[in-house]
Image: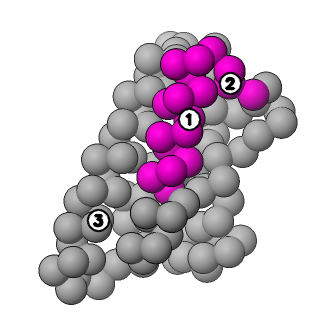
Amino acid sequence: MSYSTKDFIDDIKEILAICKEELRDISKGKPNQATKEQIEGTIIPEMNNLLEMIQKNEMPPKDQRWILSAAYITRGWNWDIWSEDRLTTKLPQLDDKYRYELE
């Protein structure tokens, strides 16, 4: 089964929905790997930027771009990559699908 631009958009929208849920949980004091600053300052803007790039048909070649939020999980934010957090799972999946499966 191929991974289409529509699938990519759906995955981005799912991550944005997860971000909203995570922000709600953070505001209620629930422990979370992600911080409000990481979600609002990096993940949401990057996902919105990807949606805009798709809309304008300006996606960079897959070999010239990573999903930066996925890279920050291990290289900057030092999240536990073995956790079952949805963002910890979905962001690397999005990166892999973008780089290796997107048509």
Q: Which residue is mark 2?
A: 59
Could you tell me the amino acid type at mark 2? Answer: Met
Residue 89 shows up from this direction: no
**Is residue 49 magenta-colored?**
yes
* Residue 57 to residue 30: above or below: above
Could you tell me the amino acid type at mark 3? Answer: Glu
Tell me the quarter of the picture where residue 87 sits: bottom left
Tell which of 60 and 85 is nearer to you. Answer: 60
Q: Quadrant of the C terminus?
A: top right
Q: CA distance from mark 1 to mark 2?
A: 8 Å
Percent of width and height locating residue 56: 59, 17
Q: Which residue is mark 3?
A: 22
Q: Residues within 10 Å of mark 2 (few under 14, many from 20)?
A: few
Q: Which mark is residue 97?
A: none
Percent of width and height locating residue 19: 34, 57
Q: Is residue 86 left or right of residue 62?
A: left
Contact check, label 1 and label 2, Cβ < 8 Å: yes
Q: CA distance from mark 1 to mark 3?
A: 20 Å
Q: Residues within 10 Å of mark 3 (few under 14, many from 20)?
A: many
Q: Residues within 10 Å of mark 1 (few under 14, many from 20)?
A: some
Please state which of the two labelled residues, at mark 1 or mark 3, is closer to the viewer: 1
Residue at 20% across, 67% down: 24
SS at badge 1:
helix
The residue segment tinted magenta is: 43-60
Could you tell me the amino acid type at mark 1? Answer: Leu
